[in-house]
Image (cartoon, coloured by chain):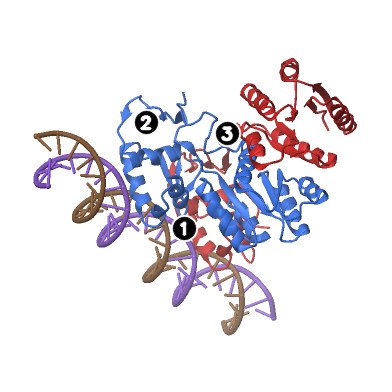
Chain colours: A red, B blue, C brown, D purple
Amino acid sequence: MSLHRLLLVEDDADMAAMLAAYLQRQGFYITRADSRDGALAALRSGRVDLILLDVSLGPDNGVQICAEIRQAQDVPIIMVSALSADHQRMAGYEVGADDYIAKPFNPDLLLARIRAVLRRAGRAPSLSHRRRDSVLRFAGWRYDAGRDEVTAPGGWQVSLSSRETALLRVFLANPLIPLTREEIAAALDDDEAAGGRAIDVLVGRLRQKTDPALIRTERGIGYVLSADVASEDA
Amino acid sequence: MSLHRLLLVEDDADMAAMLAAYLQRQGFYITRADSRDGALAALRSGRVDLILLDVSLGPDNGVQICAEIRQAQDVPIIMVSALSADHQRMAGYEVGADDYIAKPFNPDLLLARIRAVLRRAGRAPSLSHRRRDSVLRFAGWRYDAGRDEVTAPGGWQVSLSSRETALLRVFLANPLIPLTREEIAAALDDDEAAGGRAIDVLVGRLRQKTDPALIRTERGIGYVLSADVASEDA
DNA sequence: GCGTTATGTTACAAACTGTTACGAAGCTTC
DNA sequence: GAAGCTTCGTAACAGTTTGTAACATAACGC
């Protein structure tokens, strides 16, 4: 586990010492600050993975510090406070706190919540899912996920219905592997299709629009995407 | 106009109905499930931004569901439970919950914590990029909230009715995500629209005034804002 | 061969979507 | 207020997609 750095903002020296000791034993690297200026200075000076911010400096003050920090950085913040009324908690969330813990608290629970927030914050902050430019190919056939287009070996674009496209996608993603109807239905995310003959008819339509030899039948099993080849032996 | 999708897993129908109503009013799109299987099915559809998971199904059960979900997906989870003992809370965190709320809870506080978790998870598809509603862009299309203006890829200003503009805004705020008619209606804050064909006609009009290819149809699902070529972006 | 089973194929119906026409409601202008 | 315009939802019709059912054909076991 990597070493996480916590910034502990707490004006009660005893409390700070105790917490710091406990968290250090838990494997965190602790920086301490006892005031707004100290906290901001610590933030500027180095990397901080999470801030434990005590609000007992006075409600306004703590909340305000949180807001200031939020404005400058996206560091996760857990507010710790003796003020547990709902509106006070909400004020904390309002200014961007990730969690709000009322004193007195169970140290182990604090630890669990620190980890939850760290884990969530650790996920890359959402570079919005750029489409995976996956292109599936087989024997000259091609499915471009980006454009949702199917092209035949000659480069010709083939017009398929959405269902047919989905089926072809399943085959292209599992070339040369015999797929049962159940597996195909599952891949299509359509459990109902497993029951009737829908898959068969669908395969028929796809064959008609592409190449009758592209999808081979495995009697008693299902269908396989196979190379056009003449090998029909073993 | 946030269009976050919450999955509400709750076996108490009354509680579920109340919560759903409240959260819907707050602008969330709610999917409900009352069992493990229902929850997993809803998840497979892949359209959930956050899960509210009631643990009253029995502690083991709820915690176990959480673990299962965690194993498959990284969707943020807030556990809701009548069990507020520390060790029970910790069990929740242990299996990957992002927050743990004891019943009874203040709805507004729940809301604040939902927002905090969503923000941290970076799942802000609706407010897509942190820029608050100032300017939405996609594939050269642009909506300026300040002036309430829509401009086309060439920089040409397009004249849309208020309803059409609202619809485009919904799409721009949720690019590349297939939206159901229900979700669109919810985002337009018009539940009635979900019933008839109003959305379809509206989409048709918007296509006509913008670009027929801008909004793609997902048969059986709804519509997606997409781009043949995601070229321009500035 | 023959019966049985699995698969191919066609026809049909149901569901879904695009499009147009029409009318109600709201707004502007006189 | 009335005429004219715009907006927008409903209704209706057409075209497409897709599953079911039915029948035809092929493969397999004996």
Q: Nearer the viewer, residue B233 or D24?
A: B233
Circles 2, 3 touching at the beta carbon (< 8 Å):
no
Secondary element at image label 2? loop
Q: Distance between the residues labelled 2 and 3?
A: 25 Å
Q: Distance between the residues labelled 2 and 1?
A: 47 Å
| Picture quadrant of residue A37 | top right
Q: Position of residue A104 (x, y in %)?
A: 81, 39
Q: Can residue A114 be seen in this view?
A: yes
Report whether mark 2 lies on the same chain as mark 3: no
Circle 1 residues within 10 Å: few <14, some 14–19, many ≥20: some
- The residue where tag 2 is placed is B148
Instruction: State which chain disc 3 sits on.
Output: A
Circle 3 residues within 10 Å: few <14, some 14–19, many ≥20: few
Q: How far apart are marks 3 and 1 (CA)?
A: 36 Å
Q: Which residue is drawn at 41% across and 49% down?
A: B190
Q: Which comes sooner in the sequence, label 3 or label 1?
A: 3
Q: In which quarter of the image is the C terminus of chain A?
A: bottom right
Q: Is residue A221 left or right of residue B160?
A: right
Q: Count up the numbered dots.
A: 3
Q: Nearer the viewer, residue B170 or C7?
A: B170
Q: Which amino acid does label 3 sit on?
A: Ser
Instruction: State which chain disc 1 sits on.
Output: A
Q: In which quarter of the image is the N terminus of chain A?
A: top right
- The residue where tag 3 is placed is A128
Q: Where is residue A222 in the image (x, y as percent from the top left)?
A: 61, 61
Instruction: State which chain disc 2 sits on.
Output: B
Report whether mark 2 lies on the same chain as mark 1: no
Circle 2 residues within 10 Å: few <14, some 14–19, many ≥20: few
Report whether mark 3 lies on the same chain as mark 1: yes
Q: Residue furthest front?
A: A58
